[in-house]
Image (tube, rainbow, N blue to C red):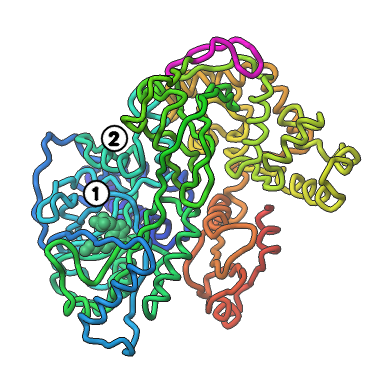
Amino acid sequence: MAGSKKKGKMAARKRAAELREALLEANRSYYVLDQPTMSDAAYDRLLRELAGIEEAYPDLATGDSPTRRVGAPVEGPFRSHRHHEPMLSLDNAFNADEMREFDGRVRRGLERGEEGEPVRYTVEPKYDGVSASLVYEKGRLAVGATRGDGGTGEDVTAQIRTIRSVPLALHPGGGRAPARLEIRGEVLLPLERFAAVNADQEEKGLPRFANPRNATAGSLRQLDPAITASRGLEFIGWGVGAVEGRRFASHSDILEALKGWGVPVSRDVAVCAGIDEAIAAHQEMEARRDRFPYELDGVVVKVDSLEERDRLGATSRHPRWAIAFKFAPRQETTRVREIVVQVGRTGILTPVALLEPVTIGGVTVSRATLHTAGEVEAKDVRAGDTVFVQRAGDVIPEVVSVVPGKRTGKERPFTMPSRCPRCGGEVEEVGAYTYCLNSSCPDQVRGRILHLTSRQAFDITGLGTKKVDQLLAAGLLAEIPDVFTLAERRDDLVKLERWEEKSVANLLEEIQRARRVPFDRFLAALSIPGIGATVARLLADAFPTLEDLRGAGEEALLEVDGIGPELARSVAHFFAEEHNWANIEKMLAAGVEIIYTEKLSDELAGKTFVLTGSLESLTREQAGKAVTDRGGKVASSVSKKTDYVVIGANPGSKADKAAKLGVETLDEKAFRKLLGL
Ligand code: IVH
């Protein structure tokens, strides 16, 4: 008896070690290498298995086990933490002239004349988050602290531990860990998470966060780490403080070492010979600003050589070797002409401010959301007010606040209408929202169709706002299933203004290709109130098929982790409505094919892929996900064990290596075919 118990424990110890290693690798591949090797569902399965083992054998649980990210709530106030090396702030530059002045100061400091060799600079994104210092002792995360006044910050270790991209122990890939290492970087909330956090705040009747930075600061200063964990913060390293037992020659070296230790660093670091290249890098990143998943407010330009940095030194506040080169501001002031109400795809009535057009970060803005009637009231925004308007990433512009002191007394307050402003139908108030109850309301239909074509649903880029409006006006679209029967209306399509044979053929071909979708994206396409991409994924993981989900009552839905009473009600209610189901049946009859996770998961089981070069129709992330969704693995380097090397445009040395080892290669077309995309 005792013998078999011991054997059981030995097996458990071995399995626990395997699981920890697999989870550690999965995190590193996802956050550091940008090559996902495991789906979220698979990660959660392994994590649950490990938690099960640690529960059965508590002494097998290690302090840096991935199950140990969330601890018990701490008591406030936070303890203070003295930084070993101070955290300075940065001087700012707003234009190229100021950057040339900075370069002049650097050159003089290094005694390099006008004609001398250019200074080597690195240029990386300046993330608009909250800076933090992570102290690793003998390779293990000992303390996580905020910047504070630069000398002393707050100890937020329990909160920092919940950030999945922060390694609890340094990965051996970076070489021997220093006895003590302060890693400096930015805690961030990705824009997508920021929107979700605010939606959640609204649902709970709590105030929205004004921007991702405030939401990050608020999440980090939660006494209960479980709340911090739920927000989905990330960390990106941008430097080091005190380092004991390791020397670096340059900033590029530091970033390389951090990456090796499993700490995410920016993928967009440009190494520049001289200030002109650095200025060009700033311009290039500003042009791409909206494509970053985080809010950026500029770039940081740093002297690369650490020996040169030492010679330049610092003033009492900033280093002389670095500067923040800011982007154009994202907030402007303008006047609200009128406040109107817009009807969304799920029937929500949203107050929208119509503005005197204003350019924000290079984009003209003439409308901004006010979110809910409660928000209008809380911010006391009235028609005629001068307001601050903000735009961040792809997020819809929003009114931040009224500019004080600009009121004349002639402003008109807003009231939510008692009937739908579009169809005149009845409305109902549910929590913070007012809904139009008529699901055939033309604005709801339009919103649903546009959403169905979006990236998180069927991803039909050829059907944008203009085309959808044209098709609605021509009576060629009346509900979402009509998108999939457009091929039957080819003759009507070619007669439309500005449509030609070629563009019709392209669109129909694209729709044909988009018909096969994973179950979660199918669910996300249905515009079920409250069900976005994230919740759709939870549902698709919990229920094997659409029939199972349809048959599940509120109670079964509530069993799913992450689904609360409101969402459960929303889903059950949606499937109980006859016309919703009729729409789904029409879509399926028109050739829409749902790919279930089960069916996907074995297709590529045991196959290892390496991706190199860029693909035209998929980002690296999408390609990786398509492989892992089907049970395959994505590796970062080619070996004899690699099954396929996918070769895009401008491939790296991996393509040569594949040829040398005789590994099968796929071009984009063959890759898509293999995956059924
Ligand atoms: S380097 C000696 N690099 O910007 C200070 N800072 O305004 C070295 N920040 O407190 C800072 N992204 O929180 C550096 N890539 C980056 C950054 C970055 C964001 C923040 C950081 C710092 C603030 C200064």
| Image region (quadrant) for ligand 1 | bottom left
Measured as percent of width and height from the top left, residue 367 is found at 53, 35
- Which mark is on residue 6? 1
Callout 2: helix, strand or loop? Answer: helix
The CA distance from mark 1 to mark 2 is: 38 Å
Measured as percent of width and height from the top left, residue 328 is found at 41, 54
The structure residue drawn at horizontal position 40% and vertical position 40%, both measured from the top left corner, is 194
- Looking at the image, is mark 1 or mark 2 nearer the viewer? 2
- From the image, give the main secondary structure of the stretch colored magenta: loop
State the residue in front, 189 or 93: 93
Residue 291 visible in the displayed image: yes
The structure residue drawn at horizontal position 54% and vertical position 24%, both measured from the top left corner, is 340
Apparent side of residue 308 relative to residue 370 in the rendered image (left or right): left
Compared with 594, 60 (above or below) is: below
- Which mark is on residue 227? 2
State the residue in front, 637 or 208: 208
Q: Residue furthest right?
A: 491
The structure residue drawn at horizontal position 32% and vertical position 30%, both measured from the top left corner, is 404
Apparent side of residue 384 relative to residue 486 in the rendered image (left or right): left
Residue 237 visible in the displayed image: no
Measured as percent of width and height from the top left, residue 604 is found at 59, 56
Apparent side of residue 599 relative to residue 71 in the rendered image (left or right): right
Q: In which quarter of the image is the N terminus?
A: top left
Amino acid type of the residue that numbered disc 2 sits on in the rendered structure: Ile
Compared with 218, 306 (above or below) is: below
The structure residue drawn at horizontal position 58% and vertical position 77%, both measured from the top left corner, is 655
Is ligand 1 closer than 8 angstroms to the Cβ of mark 2?
A: no
What segment carries the magenta color? 416-432
Measured as percent of width and height from the top left, residue 181 is found at 17, 64
Compared with 430, 2 (above or below) is: below
